[in-house]
Image (cartoon, grey):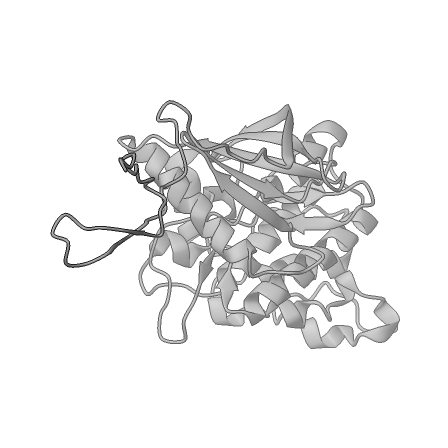
Amino acid sequence: MHQSPRYLSPWDASLESPTEKHPCHRLPLPPPTSPNKPPKKSPSKWKKGKLLGRGTFGHVFAGFNSENGTMCAVKEVKVITDDPTSKECLKQLNQEISLLSELSHPNIVQYYGSELGSDKLSVYLEYASGGSLHKLLGEYGPFKEPVIRSYTRQILSGLAYLHARNTVHRDIKGANILVDPNGEIKLADFGMAKHMTSCSSMLSFKGSPYWMAPEVIMNAHGYSLAVDIWSLGCTVLEMATSKPPWSQYEGVAAIFKIANSKGFPEIPNNLSMDGQNFIKLCLQREPTARPTALKLLQHPFVQDQSTVEPTKFNLVDDRRRPSKGS
Protein backbone atom coordinates (compact mmCIF):
# COMPACT_ATOMS: atom_id res chain seq x y z
CA MET A 1 0.00 0.00 0.00
CA HIS A 2 1.34 3.35 -1.04
CA GLN A 3 1.64 5.97 1.76
CA SER A 4 1.52 9.69 1.17
CA PRO A 5 4.73 11.48 2.07
CA ARG A 6 4.66 13.17 5.51
CA TYR A 7 5.22 16.89 5.46
CA LEU A 8 6.69 18.20 8.73
CA SER A 9 5.81 21.52 10.22
CA PRO A 10 8.58 23.68 11.60
CA TRP A 11 6.63 23.63 14.86
CA ASP A 12 6.84 19.84 15.29
CA ALA A 13 8.18 18.92 18.70
CA SER A 14 11.02 16.80 17.31
CA LEU A 15 12.42 16.65 13.82
CA GLU A 16 15.00 14.45 12.22
CA SER A 17 18.30 16.23 11.86
CA PRO A 18 20.05 16.21 8.48
CA THR A 19 22.68 13.92 9.96
CA GLU A 20 20.03 11.66 11.51
CA LYS A 21 22.12 11.56 14.70
CA HIS A 22 20.58 14.25 16.90
CA PRO A 23 16.98 15.35 17.12
CA CYS A 24 16.17 18.97 16.27
CA HIS A 25 13.88 20.93 18.60
CA ARG A 26 11.68 23.79 17.60
CA LEU A 27 12.84 27.34 18.36
CA PRO A 28 10.54 30.29 19.04
CA LEU A 29 10.44 32.90 16.33
CA PRO A 30 10.97 36.58 17.23
CA PRO A 31 7.86 38.77 17.16
CA PRO A 32 7.22 40.44 13.83
CA THR A 33 8.71 43.94 13.53
CA SER A 34 8.44 46.71 11.03
CA PRO A 35 11.68 48.52 10.23
CA ASN A 36 9.71 51.61 9.24
CA LYS A 37 7.91 52.09 12.58
CA PRO A 38 9.98 53.28 15.57
CA PRO A 39 8.85 52.18 19.03
CA LYS A 40 6.06 54.29 20.47
CA LYS A 41 7.11 56.94 22.99
CA SER A 42 4.72 57.47 25.87
CA PRO A 43 3.33 61.01 25.86
CA SER A 44 4.72 63.38 28.49
CA LYS A 45 2.48 64.26 31.40
CA TRP A 46 3.92 67.79 31.22
CA LYS A 47 2.27 70.27 28.85
CA LYS A 48 4.15 73.40 27.81
CA GLY A 49 2.34 76.75 27.94
CA LYS A 50 3.18 80.39 27.36
CA LEU A 51 6.69 81.83 27.30
CA LEU A 52 7.62 83.34 30.67
CA GLY A 53 11.08 84.62 29.81
CA ARG A 54 14.52 84.02 28.47
CA GLY A 55 17.22 83.15 30.95
CA THR A 56 20.74 81.84 31.21
CA PHE A 57 19.72 78.44 29.89
CA GLY A 58 17.37 79.40 27.07
CA HIS A 59 13.62 79.74 27.39
CA VAL A 60 11.35 79.38 30.40
CA PHE A 61 7.70 78.45 29.88
CA ALA A 62 4.66 77.96 32.06
CA GLY A 63 3.75 74.28 32.30
CA PHE A 64 0.90 72.03 33.38
CA ASN A 65 0.91 68.51 34.80
CA SER A 66 -1.90 66.74 32.96
CA GLU A 67 -2.07 63.97 35.58
CA ASN A 68 -2.48 65.95 38.79
CA GLY A 69 -3.29 69.48 37.57
CA THR A 70 -0.33 71.30 39.14
CA MET A 71 1.40 74.21 37.43
CA CYS A 72 5.15 74.25 36.87
CA ALA A 73 7.90 76.25 35.22
CA VAL A 74 9.64 74.57 32.28
CA LYS A 75 13.28 75.39 31.57
CA GLU A 76 14.34 74.39 28.07
CA VAL A 77 17.79 74.40 26.54
CA LYS A 78 18.61 73.22 23.05
CA VAL A 79 21.08 70.36 22.71
CA ILE A 80 23.68 71.38 20.13
CA THR A 81 26.62 69.02 20.44
CA ASP A 82 29.17 71.17 18.61
CA ASP A 83 28.24 74.48 20.26
CA PRO A 84 30.37 75.45 23.32
CA THR A 85 27.63 77.73 24.70
CA SER A 86 25.06 74.96 24.51
CA LYS A 87 27.47 72.56 26.21
CA GLU A 88 28.06 75.01 29.07
CA CYS A 89 24.31 75.59 29.47
CA LEU A 90 23.69 71.85 29.58
CA LYS A 91 26.48 71.40 32.12
CA GLN A 92 25.05 74.05 34.42
CA LEU A 93 21.49 72.79 33.99
CA ASN A 94 22.58 69.25 34.84
CA GLN A 95 24.37 70.64 37.89
CA GLU A 96 21.16 72.40 38.90
CA ILE A 97 19.19 69.16 38.47
CA SER A 98 21.72 67.24 40.55
CA LEU A 99 21.53 69.72 43.42
CA LEU A 100 17.81 70.47 43.40
CA SER A 101 16.89 66.79 43.31
CA GLU A 102 18.50 66.44 46.76
CA LEU A 103 16.96 69.57 48.32
CA SER A 104 13.62 69.99 50.08
CA HIS A 105 12.83 73.30 51.76
CA PRO A 106 9.85 75.70 51.57
CA ASN A 107 12.14 78.57 50.51
CA ILE A 108 13.92 76.67 47.74
CA VAL A 109 12.24 76.06 44.40
CA GLN A 110 11.11 72.44 44.14
CA TYR A 111 12.40 70.12 41.41
CA TYR A 112 9.71 67.98 39.73
CA GLY A 113 11.66 66.15 37.04
CA SER A 114 13.36 66.44 33.66
CA GLU A 115 13.16 64.98 30.16
CA LEU A 116 15.90 64.71 27.54
CA GLY A 117 14.63 64.78 23.97
CA SER A 118 16.50 64.47 20.71
CA ASP A 119 17.23 68.19 20.54
CA LYS A 120 16.43 69.70 23.96
CA LEU A 121 16.57 69.18 27.70
CA SER A 122 13.45 70.16 29.66
CA VAL A 123 13.50 70.71 33.42
CA TYR A 124 10.26 70.98 35.40
CA LEU A 125 10.31 73.18 38.50
CA GLU A 126 7.93 74.71 41.02
CA TYR A 127 6.09 77.68 39.52
CA ALA A 128 6.22 80.95 41.50
CA SER A 129 3.79 83.10 39.56
CA GLY A 130 4.80 86.36 41.26
CA GLY A 131 8.07 86.34 39.37
CA SER A 132 11.45 87.49 40.66
CA LEU A 133 12.27 90.23 43.16
CA HIS A 134 14.01 92.03 40.31
CA LYS A 135 10.79 91.98 38.28
CA LEU A 136 8.67 93.17 41.20
CA LEU A 137 11.10 96.01 41.98
CA GLY A 138 10.91 97.10 38.34
CA GLU A 139 7.11 97.12 38.44
CA TYR A 140 6.40 98.49 41.92
CA GLY A 141 9.59 100.23 43.06
CA PRO A 142 11.50 99.78 46.35
CA PHE A 143 9.86 97.61 49.00
CA LYS A 144 8.71 98.90 52.37
CA GLU A 145 10.72 97.71 55.34
CA PRO A 146 8.19 95.14 56.65
CA VAL A 147 8.31 93.44 53.23
CA ILE A 148 12.13 93.55 53.20
CA ARG A 149 12.22 92.01 56.68
CA SER A 150 9.87 89.19 55.68
CA TYR A 151 11.68 88.42 52.44
CA THR A 152 15.11 88.61 54.09
CA ARG A 153 14.07 86.20 56.84
CA GLN A 154 12.90 83.68 54.24
CA ILE A 155 16.04 84.06 52.12
CA LEU A 156 18.10 83.44 55.26
CA SER A 157 16.06 80.35 56.06
CA GLY A 158 16.81 78.90 52.62
CA LEU A 159 20.49 79.82 52.89
CA ALA A 160 20.82 78.30 56.36
CA TYR A 161 19.43 75.04 54.97
CA LEU A 162 21.84 75.13 52.01
CA HIS A 163 24.86 76.02 54.12
CA ALA A 164 24.08 73.24 56.60
CA ARG A 165 24.53 70.92 53.62
CA ASN A 166 27.84 72.62 52.70
CA THR A 167 26.28 74.03 49.54
CA VAL A 168 26.97 77.58 48.38
CA HIS A 169 24.54 79.22 45.95
CA ARG A 170 27.08 81.68 44.48
CA ASP A 171 24.51 83.85 42.67
CA ILE A 172 22.13 85.33 45.24
CA LYS A 173 20.44 88.42 43.75
CA GLY A 174 16.95 89.73 43.09
CA ALA A 175 16.69 88.09 39.67
CA ASN A 176 17.30 84.64 41.19
CA ILE A 177 14.80 84.93 44.04
CA LEU A 178 11.17 84.18 43.21
CA VAL A 179 7.95 85.06 45.03
CA ASP A 180 4.68 83.14 45.02
CA PRO A 181 1.25 84.87 45.31
CA ASN A 182 1.31 84.47 49.10
CA GLY A 183 4.62 86.30 49.49
CA GLU A 184 6.63 83.12 50.03
CA ILE A 185 10.22 83.32 48.83
CA LYS A 186 11.81 80.65 46.62
CA LEU A 187 15.57 80.60 45.98
CA ALA A 188 16.09 79.62 42.35
CA ASP A 189 18.69 79.33 39.58
CA PHE A 190 21.12 76.84 41.08
CA GLY A 191 23.25 76.58 37.94
CA MET A 192 26.11 78.31 39.75
CA ALA A 193 25.65 76.44 43.03
CA LYS A 194 28.37 74.15 44.30
CA HIS A 195 28.73 71.52 47.00
CA MET A 196 31.85 72.13 49.06
CA THR A 197 34.00 69.48 50.68
CA SER A 198 35.80 70.05 53.95
CA CYS A 199 39.19 70.20 52.28
CA SER A 200 38.40 72.42 49.31
CA SER A 201 37.58 76.05 48.64
CA MET A 202 36.10 77.65 45.57
CA LEU A 203 38.49 79.27 43.12
CA SER A 204 36.33 79.94 40.06
CA PHE A 205 35.00 83.39 39.15
CA LYS A 206 31.23 82.83 39.31
CA GLY A 207 28.34 85.14 40.09
CA SER A 208 26.97 88.56 39.11
CA PRO A 209 29.45 91.46 39.57
CA TYR A 210 27.28 93.90 41.59
CA TRP A 211 26.41 91.17 44.10
CA MET A 212 29.86 89.57 44.09
CA ALA A 213 31.96 89.38 47.25
CA PRO A 214 35.45 90.98 47.18
CA GLU A 215 37.19 87.63 47.75
CA VAL A 216 35.53 86.24 44.63
CA ILE A 217 36.80 89.16 42.55
CA MET A 218 40.29 89.01 44.05
CA ASN A 219 40.28 85.19 43.74
CA ALA A 220 43.42 84.96 45.84
CA HIS A 221 42.78 82.23 48.38
CA GLY A 222 39.46 80.78 47.32
CA TYR A 223 36.20 81.51 49.08
CA SER A 224 33.54 79.95 51.27
CA LEU A 225 29.85 79.96 52.21
CA ALA A 226 30.32 83.57 53.36
CA VAL A 227 30.06 84.77 49.74
CA ASP A 228 26.30 84.17 49.94
CA ILE A 229 26.08 86.40 53.02
CA TRP A 230 27.76 89.26 51.15
CA SER A 231 25.35 88.78 48.24
CA LEU A 232 22.43 88.77 50.68
CA GLY A 233 23.52 92.18 52.00
CA CYS A 234 23.60 93.45 48.43
CA THR A 235 20.13 92.00 47.83
CA VAL A 236 18.71 93.73 50.92
CA LEU A 237 20.04 97.01 49.52
CA GLU A 238 18.53 96.11 46.16
CA MET A 239 15.12 95.61 47.80
CA ALA A 240 15.41 98.96 49.61
CA THR A 241 16.52 101.00 46.57
CA SER A 242 15.59 98.97 43.45
CA LYS A 243 19.31 98.96 42.56
CA PRO A 244 22.30 96.88 43.63
CA PRO A 245 25.13 98.61 45.53
CA TRP A 246 27.76 100.44 43.49
CA SER A 247 25.33 100.52 40.54
CA GLN A 248 26.57 104.03 39.68
CA TYR A 249 29.71 102.32 38.35
CA GLU A 250 29.83 100.10 35.29
CA GLY A 251 31.89 97.14 34.15
CA VAL A 252 35.50 97.13 35.28
CA ALA A 253 34.99 100.27 37.38
CA ALA A 254 32.30 98.51 39.43
CA ILE A 255 34.45 95.42 39.92
CA PHE A 256 37.42 97.58 40.98
CA LYS A 257 35.26 99.50 43.45
CA ILE A 258 33.85 96.34 45.04
CA ALA A 259 37.30 94.76 45.31
CA ASN A 260 39.10 97.79 46.74
CA SER A 261 36.59 99.99 48.56
CA LYS A 262 37.31 100.30 52.27
CA GLY A 263 33.87 101.57 53.24
CA PHE A 264 30.28 100.50 52.80
CA PRO A 265 28.15 101.38 49.79
CA GLU A 266 25.49 104.04 50.27
CA ILE A 267 22.78 102.80 52.64
CA PRO A 268 19.44 104.65 52.60
CA ASN A 269 18.69 106.64 55.76
CA ASN A 270 15.04 105.61 55.73
CA LEU A 271 16.06 102.09 56.73
CA SER A 272 15.85 101.41 60.45
CA MET A 273 19.03 101.16 62.48
CA ASP A 274 18.49 97.40 62.63
CA GLY A 275 18.29 97.29 58.85
CA GLN A 276 21.45 99.35 58.42
CA ASN A 277 23.28 97.23 60.98
CA PHE A 278 22.17 94.02 59.25
CA ILE A 279 23.51 95.22 55.88
CA LYS A 280 26.84 96.24 57.42
CA LEU A 281 27.25 92.84 59.03
CA CYS A 282 26.68 91.15 55.69
CA LEU A 283 29.10 93.48 53.90
CA GLN A 284 32.12 92.92 56.13
CA ARG A 285 35.13 92.72 53.82
CA GLU A 286 36.71 89.96 55.88
CA PRO A 287 34.67 86.80 55.14
CA THR A 288 35.19 85.37 58.63
CA ALA A 289 33.69 88.54 60.13
CA ARG A 290 30.34 87.92 58.43
CA PRO A 291 27.82 86.06 60.60
CA THR A 292 26.47 82.77 59.32
CA ALA A 293 22.96 82.54 57.91
CA LEU A 294 21.87 80.68 61.03
CA LYS A 295 23.27 83.43 63.26
CA LEU A 296 21.65 86.18 61.18
CA LEU A 297 18.25 84.53 61.64
CA GLN A 298 18.52 85.77 65.25
CA HIS A 299 19.15 89.38 64.19
CA PRO A 300 16.48 91.88 65.33
CA PHE A 301 16.01 93.05 61.74
CA VAL A 302 14.34 89.73 60.88
CA GLN A 303 12.89 88.93 64.31
CA ASP A 304 10.61 90.40 66.91
CA GLN A 305 12.78 92.89 68.82
CA SER A 306 11.43 91.66 72.15
CA THR A 307 12.89 88.18 71.63
CA VAL A 308 16.45 89.07 70.60
CA GLU A 309 19.30 90.83 72.37
CA PRO A 310 20.29 93.58 69.85
CA THR A 311 23.69 94.35 71.39
CA LYS A 312 24.97 90.95 70.24
CA PHE A 313 25.03 92.28 66.70
CA ASN A 314 26.59 95.74 67.19
CA LEU A 315 29.47 96.70 64.92
CA VAL A 316 32.45 98.32 66.62
CA ASP A 317 32.24 101.38 64.38
CA ASP A 318 28.43 101.65 64.36
CA ARG A 319 28.01 104.30 67.08
CA ARG A 320 24.76 105.69 65.70
CA ARG A 321 22.77 102.72 66.97
CA PRO A 322 20.80 103.69 70.10
CA SER A 323 21.46 101.67 73.20
CA LYS A 324 18.85 99.23 74.41
CA GLY A 325 15.98 100.99 76.15
CA SER A 326 16.76 104.48 74.79
Among all residues in the image, which is located at the extreme front? 1
Residue 153 vs residue 168, the one in the foreground: 168
Residue 234 is situated, as x and y percent measured from the top left of the image, at 59, 49
Quarter of the figure with residue 11: top left
Q: Is residue 326 above or below residue 202?
A: below
Drawn side of residue 213 relative to residue 19, left or right: right
| Displayed quadrant of residue 251 | top left
Q: Residue at x 47, y 43 (%)?
A: 208
Q: Is residue 208 above or below residue 104?
A: above
Residue at image position (47%, 66%) is: 286
Residue 124: image location, x then y, percent = 59, 41
Residue found 37% across the figure and 41% down from its top: 30
Q: Position of residue 193 (x, y in %)?
A: 48, 54
Image height of 214 relative to 72, above or below: below
* Picture quarter with the N terminus: top left
Give 317 or 304, whichever is nearer the viewer: 304
Relative to 31, is 284 on the left or the right? right
- Number of marks: 0
Q: Is residue 76 above or below residue 291?
A: above
Q: Is residue 207 something one can see in this rendering?
A: no
Q: Is residue 316 left or right of residue 263?
A: right
Q: Nearer the viewer, residue 186 or 254?
A: 186
Which image quadrant: the C terminus? bottom right
Q: Nearer the viewer, residue 233 or 50?
A: 50
Name which residue lies at 73% across and 71% down: 298
Instruction: Determine if residue 81 is in view.
Output: yes
